[in-house]
Image (cartoon, grey):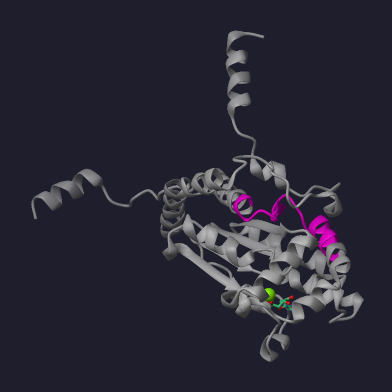
Amino acid sequence: MGKKDKGKEKKRAKTPPSVRDLLRVGPEFDLGAQDPRRIVAGPGDKETARAAALALEPEITALQERLFAESKGGGKRRLLVVLQGMDTSGKGGAVKAIDRVCEPIGLRVAGFGAPTKEELRHHYLWRINKALPPVGSIGIFDRSHYEDVLIVRVRNLVPEDVWSGRYDEINDWEKKLADSGLVFIKCMLHISKAEQQARLLARLEEPDKRWKYNPGDVDERELWDKYQEAYQVALTRCSTDYAPWYVIPADRKWHRDWLLTQLVAETLREMDPQYPAVDYDVETEIGRVQGS
Ligand code: AMP
Ligand code: MG
């Protein structure tokens, strides 16, 4: 090994592993084999992890500003974080974690509950299309079009021949958006059944958390295995090069937030948004301003 190669080796060893590579769902993925308490990378304690996540804020907001500036110069790129997970998996907490490291002005959050009567009259992607972030900004979806192959599949809300065609349809739709400049970060917040029980009980025991409790959550919980199966299929059939799925071990909230923040930072770094070239002569304009 030459000197140059040794240098490269050293650098590689020092570079922290890409969280995207560690979490990405590939063809062999098995949800049942994932430990929701696992520490994937990074700090192993709450305090350090929280501080490390927050420390990314200046870099993320700078990249976010560049993304916005790029769009003002005609750039078409935008970022969308899709959050899915069982009840109490921490989708709301995850939104807060991303919000903490972003400028609120460039951030659009949309949540999707059971469709309204009007929404039911349209194709299931109709309400999703309406909520996409504008170019130059970052969107977060708290639940998404994936509900249409999750709860809809588990509860047979439409016939099987209808929901079974949606995986390919979703892939095609995401491909079109990706080609148009939308970058996806699709995250499943993966909690254990025991952790869900503890979180549901906490919601009941703490008066200021009771508003979050929904008796219907227990009905969904009873279908836990069917949901895991539906997730397994959605994750493997719809994890693509252009819109990969990431599975985030989410029993530890601080680790979940650290991982998410890393995913956003890594993705924005790779997007490397650029300030647009100005369409005036800077020297001339300095002269004009000075003489004015
Ligand atoms: P939450 O996010 O806790 O407010 O709950 C929203 C509920 O709406 C969850 O039980 C979702 O599964 C349900 N939901 C979201 N999208 C759909 C959909 N397309 N069809 C049926 N139920 C849905
Ligand atoms: Mg809920």
Q: Is residue 134 above or below residue 75?
A: below
Q: Nearer the viewer, residue 160 or 250?
A: 250
Q: Is residue 178 above or below residue 208?
A: above
Q: Nearer the viewer, residue 186 or 214?
A: 214
Quadrant of the image where one finds ligand 2:
bottom right
Q: Is residue 37 above or below residue 209?
A: above
Can residue 244 be seen at all in this image of the molecule?
Answer: no
Quarter placement of the N terminus? top right
Residue 54 shown left or right of residue 210 in the figure? left
User: Measuring 69% from the left and 42% from the top, which residue is drawn there?
Assistant: 40
Residue 92 at what x, y percent from top left?
60, 67
Quarter placement of the C terminus? bottom left
Is 221 colored magenta in this rendering?
no
Q: Which residue ends up furthest to the left in the rendered image?
A: 291
Q: Is residue 71 above or below residue 271?
A: below
Is 251 colored magenta in this rendering?
yes
User: Measuring 42% from the left and 48% from the top, which residue is drawn there?
Assistant: 58
Residue 98 at what x, y percent from top left?
53, 58
The boundaries of the magenta stretch are 230-255
Q: Quadrant of residue 226?
A: bottom right
Residue 53 shown left or right of residue 240 in the figure? left
User: Measuring 91% from the left and 75% from the top, which residue is drawn there?
Assistant: 161
Q: Nearer the viewer, residue 125 or 185?
A: 185
Residue 124 at what x, y percent from top left?
73, 78
Q: Which residue ends up furthest to the front in the rendered image?
A: 205
Residue 51 shown left or right of residue 131 in the figure? left
Residue 260 at what x, y percent from top left?
60, 52
Q: Nearer the viewer, residue 165 or 227?
A: 227
Can residue 28 be seen at all in this image of the molecule?
Answer: yes
User: Measuring 56% from the left and 45% from the top, which residue is drawn there?
Assistant: 49
